[in-house]
Image: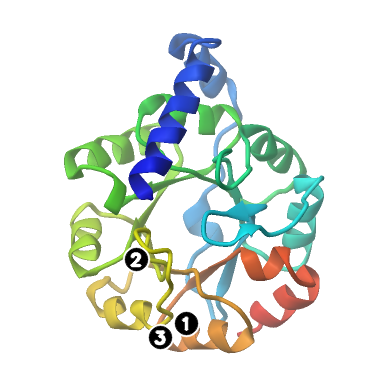
Amino acid sequence: MLEGLYAGSLEDAAARESLLDIISLERLALAQTEPLDALRHLAKSSTIKILAEVKRASPSRGDLAQISDPAALAETYAYSGASAISVLTEQRKFKGSLEDLREVRARVAVPVLRKDFIANEYQILEARAAGADIVLLIVAGLAQKRLLKLKNFIEQLGMTAFVETHNADEVKFAVDADARLLGVNARDLSTFETDRNLFSTLVHLIPSETIKVAESAVRNLDDVRHYREAGADVALVGETLVMGDAAKLLSEFTAV
């Protein structure tokens, strides 16, 4: 599944590159205003921070919500207390787009994450040109040397690399790579099953100064409390928000 998602994203990026070459894209990226400081917005505090996700669909659950105006949803998220917005831009299984990212960036004043299957510099330049402040890198999907090179490129552009892990070896690698925003995804990207307790079994491997993000398996307030008590600084929440009353849920979640 993960290999297929990467292959599809790279194929789609190549199609876009045939219309806009990397030199022209780089000019657009460098012309953008400076990225927001995501680490400051997501810094440790007395309550958990929420990284709220704009998500129409997923490979495991299919269609989740008809989001005709992603920017309006993002505004609701930000107004209701979300510290940053994640925008899924993968178009085949998640039904997202870079246009969603551009629209969200234009309407919110908090950091925006490009969440996709990022594997090359062109995709990173696309993220910056669309206004992203954060770019996702998945340890399970990239060779280690490649991930390090992409992380460096993200940071050269002034953005923050969000490094996602799924097991102890991946966490140790992310720590050694000096990931300052480090996620533990409860969703197994091979089976797409979730384990809410995965974060608590791995969090001790992450330095105290690193911003720790618990991803997936947030269904309700109890799950947010569970992650907070386990040591999460941030919870990434998508499906629950798009399928429920986002404003009400965020007011509850951000008080934990």
Is there a contact, CB below 8 Å, between mark 2 and mark 3? Answer: no
In what quadrant of the picture does the C terminus appear? bottom right
User: Which residue is rendered at x = 33% and y = 69% of the image?
Assistant: 209
Q: Give the labeled residue for mark 3.
A: 230
- The numbered dot on residue 210 is 2
- Of mark 2 and mark 3, the one earlier in the sequence is 2
Q: How crowded is the residue under tag 3: few (<14 C-alpha within 10 Å), some, or many (20+)?
A: some
Where 100 falls versus 162 (above or below)?
above
Q: Secondary structure at mark 1?
A: helix
Q: Give the labeled residue for mark 1.
A: 227
Which kind of residue does numbered mark 2 sit on? Thr
**Could you tell me residue 98's position as x and y percent?**
62, 33
**Residue 105 sits in quarter:** top right
Question: Of the residues tagged 2 and 3, which is closer to the observer?
Answer: 3
| Residue situated in front as seen by the camera: 9 or 109 | 9
**Could you tell me residue 42's position as x and y percent?**
52, 63
Q: How crowded is the residue under tag 1: few (<14 C-alpha within 10 Å), some, or many (20+)?
A: many
Mark-to-mark CA distance, 2 and 3: 15 Å
Which kind of residue does numbered mark 1 sit on? Tyr
Residue 124 at least partly seen = no
User: Which residue is rendered at x = 73% and y = 48% of the image?
Assistant: 108
**Residue 193 sits in quarter:** bottom left
Q: Position of 191 compared to 248: left or right?
A: left
Where 62 falls versus 15 (above or below)?
below
**Residue 213 sits in quarter:** bottom left
Q: Position of 183 compared to 132: left or right?
A: left
Which kind of residue does numbered mark 3 sit on? Ala
Is there a contact, CB below 8 Å, between mark 3 and mark 1? Answer: yes
